[in-house]
Amino acid sequence: MKTLILSTLLKVLTPLFIGFALYMFFRGHNNPGGGFIAGLIASIPFMLHAMVFGYEGTTRVFKIKPKLLASIGLLLALVSGLFSVFNGQPFMSPIWIEETVPLIGKIGTPIFFDLGVFLVVFGVVLQITFLLTEE
């Protein structure tokens, strides 16, 4: 389904979706947002690209490996929970660094957990999309 309008709009919409996904990611955890919704939002332009240009065209342009992304995300979410165990606290207890980073705030294990969730959701949604768009 290669349409000129959608393929042209994808060039404009992709950075907008990625920017909004980043906003939702960093807004999350204590507010609505976080890794899950950011992963869904970030996968939308790649889903549209796969519908317009097919599975092969999308993987050729973006070099995305959804299974690898989901695996790395699952590992990252697990490791972020193990940091607290190594600190003598219960599993998934948050650990925060005292210094703040401009525009982001404090960095801690919840951010790494959200990043893992983001990668899992992004990878799984793209894997399902790629399986449905394969010819």
Image (spheres, rainbow, N blue to C red):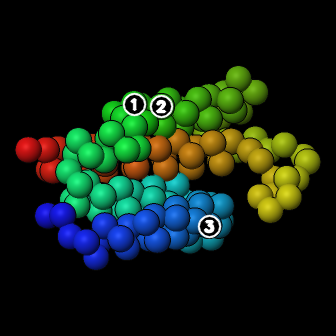
Using a 10 Å C-alpha cutoff, classify the residue at mark 1 as few (fewer than 14 neighbours), some (14 to 19) or many (20 or more): some
Decide: few, some or many residues near mark 3? Use Cα within 10 Å; few <14, some 14-19, many ≥20: some
| Residue at horizontal 45 percent and vertical 59 percent from the top | 42
The amino acid beneath tag 3 is: Tyr
Q: Is residue 6 above or below residue 84?
A: below
Q: Work out which quarter of the rendered image holds the N terminus and state it.
A: bottom left
Q: Secondary structure at mark 1?
A: helix
From the image, which quarter does the C terminus lie in? top left
Give the distance between the C-alpha atoms of the residues marked 3 and 1, in whole angstroms.
24 Å
Q: Quadrant of residue 10?
A: bottom left
- Considering depth in this image, is 60 or 16 the residue closer to the camera? 60
Residues tagged 2 and 1 counted as in contact (Cβ below 8 A): yes
Q: Is residue 58 above or below residue 74?
A: below
Q: Give above or below for 27 relative to 74.
A: below
| Relative side of 129 to 94, left or right | left
Measured Cα–Cα span from mark 2 to mark 1: 6 Å
The residue drawn where x is 39% and y is 49% is 121
Say which residue label 1 marks: 68
Q: Residue furthest top?
A: 86
Q: Nearer the viewer, residue 64 or 11?
A: 11
Q: Residue at x 91, y 48 (%)?
A: 99
Tag shown at residue 23: 3
Which residue occupies 52% across, 55% down? 35
SS at badge 3: helix
- Residue 63, relative to residue 103: is it above or below? above
**Which residue, given by chain and number where applicable, does mark 2 sit on?**
72
Residue 53 showing in the rendered view = yes
User: Farthest bottom residue?
Assistant: 5
Q: Give how far across and how far down residue 74 sits, in percent.
A: 45, 35
Three-letter amino acid code of the residue under disc 2: Ile
Q: Secondary structure at mark 2?
A: helix
Q: Amino acid at mark 1?
A: Leu
